[in-house]
Amino acid sequence: MSVEKSNHPFLNSKSPCLFLFLEFTYPYLDIIENKKVGRELSTEEIEFFVENYTNGNITDYQAAALIMAICINGMTQ
C-alpha cells in the first residue's frame, strides 16, 4: 500500500507511530491477498495459516476470507 495514495487519515498523518504501523505486518493477510488475486500458495503458507488458525491466532472471519478466495480461484494439486 502506498502511503501517498491512501485515503486513510492515519496513513496520511505524520504520526511517529506510522513507521511502526507500516513495519508491523501480518503474514496471514498476505496469504489471503495472494489467494484473492489468484496466486498459488506454497506449502509453507498453507501450513502457516492452518497452524495459526488452529492455535487461535487467526480469526474465523479471516479464515472464511481465505476459504472464499480458494472457492473462487481454486487450488493447485
Image (cartoon, helix red, strand yellow):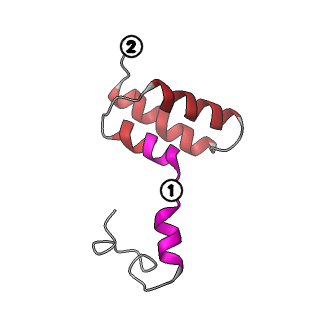
Q: Nearer the viewer, mark 2 or mark 1?
A: 1
Residue type, mark 2 in image: Gln
Give the numbered dot on residue 25: 1
Q: Earlier in the sequence, mark 2 or mark 1?
A: 1
Q: On the image, which quarter does residue 71 sit in? A: top left
Determine the residue positioned at 40% across, 29% down: 41
SS at mark 1 in the image: loop
Magenta portion: prevailing SS class: helix
Quarter holding the C terminus is: top left
Vertical comparison of 40 with 34: above or below: above
Residue 5 vs 14, above or below: the answer is above
Which secondary structure, mark 2? Answer: loop
Q: Residue at x 44, y 34 (%)?
A: 68
Residue situated furthest bottom in the rendering: 14
Name the spot of residue 47 as percent of width and height, x first: 56, 27
- The reply, left or right, for residue 38 in relation to residue 22 is left
| Residue 43 picture location, percent across and down | 47, 24
Which residue is the extreme one toward the right?
A: 55
Estimate the x, y position of residue 62 in percent, counting from the top left: 55, 44
Q: Residue furthest top?
A: 77
Q: Amino acid at mark 1?
A: Thr
Tally of numbered tags = 2
